[in-house]
Image (tube, rainbow, N blue to C red):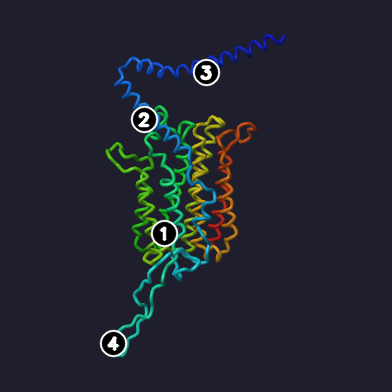
């Protein structure tokens, strides 16, 4: 009685085997034809073609290595960048060598005297001097660190030639292969663009009416450069994205050097913190909506080729915001303590750190009720919304 069933199952496996055999034959056919052509050529042609093939294999090997090797990846990196929370505000005058500043050496600056005394012979004597140094910005330091992580410690994937070439003309983001690190880097860059915009528009100016700091403006412009630029574009020779981003590192560091010497401003006020937190909450909310849209458009589980880049883009944002918000805690430490938001702020930082523990090997976009195909996008969206709810609560407290 079981013979027909066994025969049916056997035929199914035979059909599956034939299907795989046909697929492999289709894939190998052009290579076999190329091999036949190659063996019939002269040694000069074979030598030239062989060198070209070796160069292509080597280039792809280098590209694959860079997409899989994540140098400097550390879930606890803010601890080494933000040395101490401190009790003062970024940009505040401090004494050189105090625990709340990272000033290595700063020459005393003499300011215009705000009070004068007229001596008997009519000469003016300055009664006040500028402080020895001002406290540098942890946000700016963290931004420079993250740019360095993206383009110096690692290769910038999106502008590599083979990343632009794709898989037989198909963009890597439309395949399940070799696009995770690129999406992760783009998530970090999205945070850096948001942060430098806020530095230029409000944090690096006094009440939004002073002159824009040119170093911050140049850093923002560099980070807003197209993310896929190579040495040659449609309009001719151009500069690759990593070159511009390396310039942004220098501009950010130059701003902090000027800030240490009290030559520029960092406006660490409660309303600026409120605005910054509100913009970050909006940015995270937008990403959670992107995840929701993908979940609604597909529930292919392990076989969704776009789920991985959505996941790793969001992961890159959380990774970067973990550092930026930790640095913000240091720059606005006095306000955080005075407004009694330290507890909720530290809880938010803890949740950001916990979200970074979710690093599945393969990303699945299955139905949320599925017992076989998990929904990693739903899990990531949960972490995003937890962080966003804390940001909204912090904003509400600051707005009172």
The answer to whether mark 1 and mark 4 are in CB contact below 8 A is no
Q: Dot 2 corresponds to which residue?
A: 55
The answer to whether mark 3 and mark 4 are in CB contact below 8 A is no
Q: Is residue 236 above or below residue 7?
A: below
| Badge 1 or badge 2: first in the primary sequence | 2
Residues under labels 2 and 3: Cα distance?
30 Å
- Image position, residue 97 (x, y; %): 46, 68
Q: Dot 3 corresponds to which residue?
A: 20
| Badge 1 or badge 3: first in the primary sequence | 3
Q: Which residue is drawn at 52% across and 66% down?
A: 87
The answer to whether mark 1 and mark 3 are in CB contact below 8 A is no
Residues under labels 4 and 2: Cα distance?
81 Å
Query: Looking at the image, is mark 3 or mark 4 nearer the viewer?
Result: 3
Residues under labels 1 and 3: Cα distance?
60 Å
Give the left or right position of residue 366, taking residue 197 as reference.
right
SS at mark 1 in the image: helix
Query: Looking at the image, is mark 1 or mark 4 nearer the viewer?
Result: 4
| Badge 4 or badge 2: first in the primary sequence | 2
Which disc number belongs to residue 122? 4
Q: In this view, does 159 lie above or below 109?
A: above
- Image position, residue 148 (x, y; %): 42, 49
SS at mark 4 in the image: loop
| Badge 2 or badge 3: first in the primary sequence | 3
Residues under labels 1 and 4: Cα distance?
43 Å
Q: Dot 1 corresponds to which residue?
A: 202
Residues under labels 3 and 4: Cα distance?
100 Å
Count residues near mark 4 (Cα–Cα under 10 Å), then give few for <14, some for 14-19, many for 20+. Answer: few
The quarter holding residue 213 reads bottom left
Which quadrant does the C terminus fall into?
A: bottom right
SS at mark 2 in the image: helix
Residues under labels 1 and 2: Cα distance?
50 Å
300 or 396, nearer to the observer: 300
């Amino acid at each position: 009685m079981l013979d027909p069933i066994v025969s049916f199952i056997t035929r199914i496996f035979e059909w599956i085997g034939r299907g795989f055999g046909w697929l492999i034959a289709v894939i190998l056919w052009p290579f076999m034809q190329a091999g036949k052509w190659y063996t019939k050529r002269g040694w000069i042609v074979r030598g030239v073609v062989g060198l070209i093939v070796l160069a292509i294999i080597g280039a792809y090997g280098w590209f694959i290595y860079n997409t899989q090797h994540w140098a400097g990846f550390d879930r606890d990196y803010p601890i080494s960048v933000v040395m101490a929370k401190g009790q003062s505000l970024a940009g505040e005058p401090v004494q050189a060598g105090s625990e709340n500043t990272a000033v290595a050496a700063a020459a005393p600056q003499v300011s215009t005297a705000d009070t004068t005394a007229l001596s008997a012979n009519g000469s003016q004597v300055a009664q006040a001097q500028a402080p020895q140094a001002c406290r540098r910005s942890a946000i700016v330091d963290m931004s420079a660190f993250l740019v360095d992580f993206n383009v110096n410690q690692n290769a910038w994937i999106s502008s590599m030639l083979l990343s632009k070439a794709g898989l037989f003309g198909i963009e890597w983001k439309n395949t399940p292969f070799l696009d995770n690190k690129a999406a992760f880097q783009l998530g970090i860059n999205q945070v850096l663009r948001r942060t430098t915009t806020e530095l230029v528009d409000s944090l690096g100016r006094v009440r939004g009416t002073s002159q824009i700091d040119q170093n911050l403006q140049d850093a923002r412009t560099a980070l807003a450069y197209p993310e896929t630029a190579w040495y040659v574009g449609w309009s001719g020779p151009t500069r690759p994205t990593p070159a511009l981003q390396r310039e942004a590192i220098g501009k950010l560091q130059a701003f902090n050097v000027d800030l240490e010497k009290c030559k520029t401003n960092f406006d660490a006020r409660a309303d600026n913190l409120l605005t910054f937190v509100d913009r970050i909450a909006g940015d995270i909310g937008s990403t959670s909506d992107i995840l929701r849209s993908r979940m609604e458009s597909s529930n292919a589980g392990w076989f969704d080729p776009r789920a991985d880049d959505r996941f790793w883009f969001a992961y890159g944002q959380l990774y970067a915001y973990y550092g930026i918000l930790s640095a913000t805690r240091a720059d606005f430490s006095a306000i955080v303590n005075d407004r009694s938001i330290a507890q909720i702020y530290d809880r938010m930082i803890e949740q950001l750190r916990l979200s970074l523990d979710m690093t599945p090997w393969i990303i699945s976009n299955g139905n949320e009720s599925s017992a076989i195909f998990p929904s990693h996008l739903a899990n990531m969206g949960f972490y995003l919304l937890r962080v966003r709810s804390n940001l909204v609560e912090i904003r509400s407290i600051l707005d009172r």
